[in-house]
Image: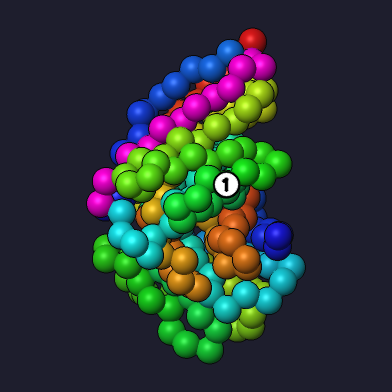
């Protein structure tokens, strides 16, 4: 079973920041938080991952709480192309470990 | 990151037949994974495929139904055998290269 809990759906206005929450209260010390997204009819796409520090890349920012029991993925300026299902996954950063996908959050960016 | 291609991208098959899906990676990867995504559902891992050894199957998936080959570090095949309508799904190939990345999927419809 997935170790994360996400809201099933969210809406966001185009151009605004999209903040996607994820609860992972049973996360272990060696487990990272990964975010992927799946745009309709495509394979999942890696977005970002982190252990305990906040992370930022060209796609998004990842904010992890100090107790690591929850995190938020931030898309700073959402566009219509960001409409997708977003998956939050916790996993040890061991080479070859597979990902256990939960149902994710369906983000709809509205014009 | 590496790029994965899959063939065919989609197919419609008759009950009782078999289909082999090919997965080609543009970089050498030690471990590859095969997932199934049933309509409206999240991804479920079928098996992990290492080069030079038998694939490791997840609970509920067996080799007779989903035989896998992994002849080298850039290629793998998944066969869906003796198909029934319940096998209608998207089948995705994945590999680990810096991060885990996914192919575009093969959309299978069984009549």
Residue A65 drawn at (x, y percent) = 39, 41
Judging depth in this view, the residue of B78 and A94 nearest the camera is A94
The residue most toward the right is: B26
The part of the image, by quadrant, that contains residue A74 is: top right
Residue at x-position 56% and y-position 61%: B100
Residue B8 drawn at (x, y percent) = 64, 55
Residue at x-position 55% and y-position 84%: B51
Q: Would you say residue B99 is visible in this rendering?
A: yes
Q: Which residues are magenta?
A: A14-26
> Residue under mark 1: which chain is it in?
A
- On the image, numbered disc 1 is attached to which residue? A55
- Magenta-span inclusion, residue A24: yes
Residue at x-position 70% and y-position 62%: B2
Residue A107 drawn at (x, y percent) = 50, 26
Mark 1 Cα-neighbour bin, 10 Å: few <14, some 14–19, many ≥20:
some
The residue most toward the top is: A111
């Amino acid at each position: 079973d997935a170790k994360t809990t996400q809201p099933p759906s969210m809406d966001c206005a185009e151009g605004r920041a999209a903040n996607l929450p994820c609860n992972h209260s049973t996360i272990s010390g060696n487990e990272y938080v990964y975010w992927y997204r799946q745009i309709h009819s495509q394979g999942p796409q890696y977005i970002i991952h982190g252990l305990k520090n906040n992370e930022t890349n060209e796609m998004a920012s990842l904010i992890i709480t100090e107790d690591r029991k929850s995190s938020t993925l931030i898309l700073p300026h959402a566009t219509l192309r960001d409409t997708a299902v977003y998956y939050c996954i916790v996993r040890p950063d061991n080479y070859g470990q597979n990902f256990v996908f939960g149902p994710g959050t369906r983000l709809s960016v509205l014009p | 990151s590496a790029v994965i291609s899959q063939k065919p991208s989609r197919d419609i098959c008759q009950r009782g037949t078999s289909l082999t899906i090919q997965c080609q990676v543009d970089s050498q990867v030690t471990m590859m994974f095969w997932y199934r995504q049933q309509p409206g559902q999240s991804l479920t891992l079928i098996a992990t495929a290492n080069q030079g050894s038998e694939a490791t199957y997840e609970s509920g998936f067996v080799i007779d139904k989903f035989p896998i080959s992994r002849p080298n570090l850039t290629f793998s095949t998944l066969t869906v055998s003796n198909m029934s309508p319940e096998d209608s799904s998207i089948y995705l190939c994945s590999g680990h290269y810096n991060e885990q990345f996914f192919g575009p999927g093969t959309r299978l419809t069984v009549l």
